[in-house]
Image (cartoon, rainbow, N blue to C red):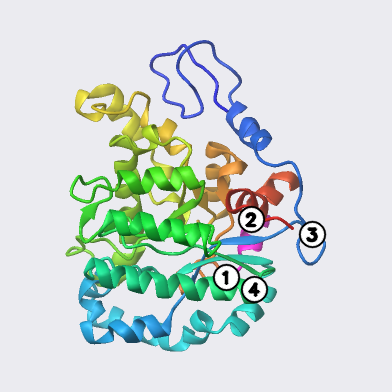
Amino acid sequence: MMFTCATPECTDPRHDHLAGPRPRHAAAKAARAAASTKVIRGRRGKSLRVDIHCHYFNQAVAAKVAHLNPAQYEPSVTFANALTREVNVKQIRDRLPKLTSIETRLEDMDRMGIDMQAVSPAPNQCYYWTDPELGVELSRMVNDRLAEIVATWPNRFVALGTVPLQQVDLAVAELERCVKKLGLRGVEINPSVNGLDLTDPRLNLEKFFAKAQALDVVIFMHPIGFTQGERLVDHYFNNVIGNPMETTIAASHLIFDGVMQRYPKLKIVLPHAGGYLAHYWARMDHGYRARPDCRTVIKRPPSSYLAKMYFDTITFDPEMLRHMIDKYGPGHVLLGTDYPYDMGEDDPLGLIGSVRGLKRADKDLIEGGNAARLLKIKR
């Protein structure tokens, strides 16, 4: 719920910019009120704790495409120096049990205090670079296995699948199968498709976004490095800098090209604390005010559409997390770990608990209440 504002210069995403003002922190209060007031309890009798950002690697699917040399299509590999590639190979070798063994995963979840994971594919297992027919076959394999995990451990997992965005009709069909037949709660997508932005007319993904809104499911938009990372080869920059930048560019296109305006009920989750956009939103609002080429489609300041999105807690800093909660409201921030990768957050509850002045009710929302609402988890 938003409120109106008569100040034409105002760029606050919490305002509707039509009439009179309301108090400064009304958005956070409105977001909290809009969220479910029912506290869903976890296995320990405490509020439910749900990890929105965690991955599963499907070895059978990887083996099926190994002869095609998938690494040549992955920015995280192609834009990396020799040392980064060596470290990444070691990471995958060391963490493969966490990526593939549910028993190992459950032990880690218990150690971290996580009741449920909204498990999604390893980000490089979207396979947009394949031909569409192979793409849908791989997607079905990934999704079937995720559904099997959920069916085996229904109290510990829900799942987000994948769809072949390289062919929109196949993507829409697989999205519908994911939700209606397999019971998945949404999909993970990459922020671009073979170098094309999600709003590129050549992809024609309008039908995909329309179907996601109609099904009322989550779109979890996870990068695999920056797609034009020639300047990000050293120091693991293609992840450290490139992942948030890829998310920032994709989210900006969804806003400025009108996807968020046309589909205001989309449930889009931006990982890694929303990339850079969530923390430097004022510059795009200034551009919207100052330049006609920044407002060719949208009718409101860009940050008003950004405020409809959701962000995980992977900030690595309590002050940064506090600022994000204050800006977008506790109803739009979700616990995330990026399990089991080394750029993830191993103590998410500790990070949330270190945020000064955070009320217990807000902690309950962030730790699991928001995810339960978005993912339709009932306990």
Q: Nearer the viewer, mark 4 or mark 1?
A: 4
Residue type pointed to by label 1: Asp
Distance, label 2 to label 4, CA atoms, is 16 Å
Helix, strand or loop for disc 1: loop
Residue type pointed to by label 4: Met
Helix, strand or loop for disc 3: loop
**Is residue 79 rendered magenta in the image?**
no
Q: Which residue is rendered at x = 63% and y = 51% of the image?
A: 366
Q: Quadrant of the C terminus?
A: bottom right
Residue type pointed to by label 2: Ile
Q: Position of residue 151 (x, y in %)?
A: 62, 72
Q: Which residue is mark 1?
A: 346
Residue 109 is tagged as: 4
Distance, label 1 to label 3, CA atoms, is 20 Å
Residue 211 is tagged as: none
Q: Name above or below for residue 292 compared with residue 332.
A: above
User: Magenta stretch mostly in which secondary structure?
Assistant: helix
Give the magenta range. Answer: 346-355
Q: Which residue is mark 3?
A: 46
Helix, strand or loop for disc 2: helix
Q: Which residue is mark 2?
A: 352
Q: Nearer the viewer, mark 2 or mark 4?
A: 4
